[in-house]
Amino acid sequence: MAIKHRKGQVVKHHKKMRDGTEVKPCKYYKQTGSAIMGGSINGEPILDQEGNPIPWSKIEY
């Protein structure tokens, strides 16, 4: 019988949370055609005080 080997490392994924709810990634497209990877909670985008989306890298775990 053949031995089954893992294909890659096993990684524990951490979910990003904000105010006790899970943040899901989403991509925002500007009118100029550029895109920003941001987050959303229950389908509502996470925006700063100026109305711009917060980048995914700035959202903490």
Image: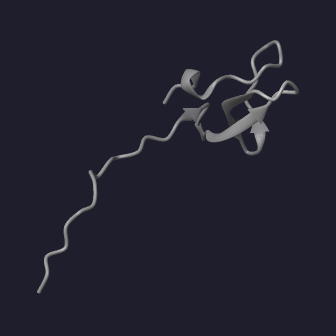
Between 54 and 29, the one lying in front of the other is 29
Q: Position of residue 10 (x, y in %)?
A: 29, 52
Residue at the far right in the pictured view? 31
Residue at the far top in the pictured view? 50
Instruction: Give the residue at x 88% y 27%.
Output: 31
Quadrant where the N terminus is found in the figure: bottom left
Q: In which quarter of the image is residue 6?
A: bottom left
Residue at the far front in the pictured view? 33
Instruction: Give the residue at x 26% y 51%.
Output: 9
Figure check: 48 above or below 34? above
Figure check: 41 above or below 19? below
Q: Position of residue 54 (x, y in %)?
A: 68, 22
Is residue 30 shown left or right of residue 9?
right
The colour mode here is one colour
Task: Give the number of callouts.
Answer: 0
Between 54 and 20, the one lying in front of the other is 54
Instruction: Give the residue at x 76% y 33%.
Output: 28
Is residue 45 shown left or right of residue 60?
right
Is residue 9 shown left or right of residue 45?
left
Q: Where is residue 25 in the image (x, y as percent from the top left)?
A: 63, 40
Q: In which quarter of the image is residue 26?
A: top right
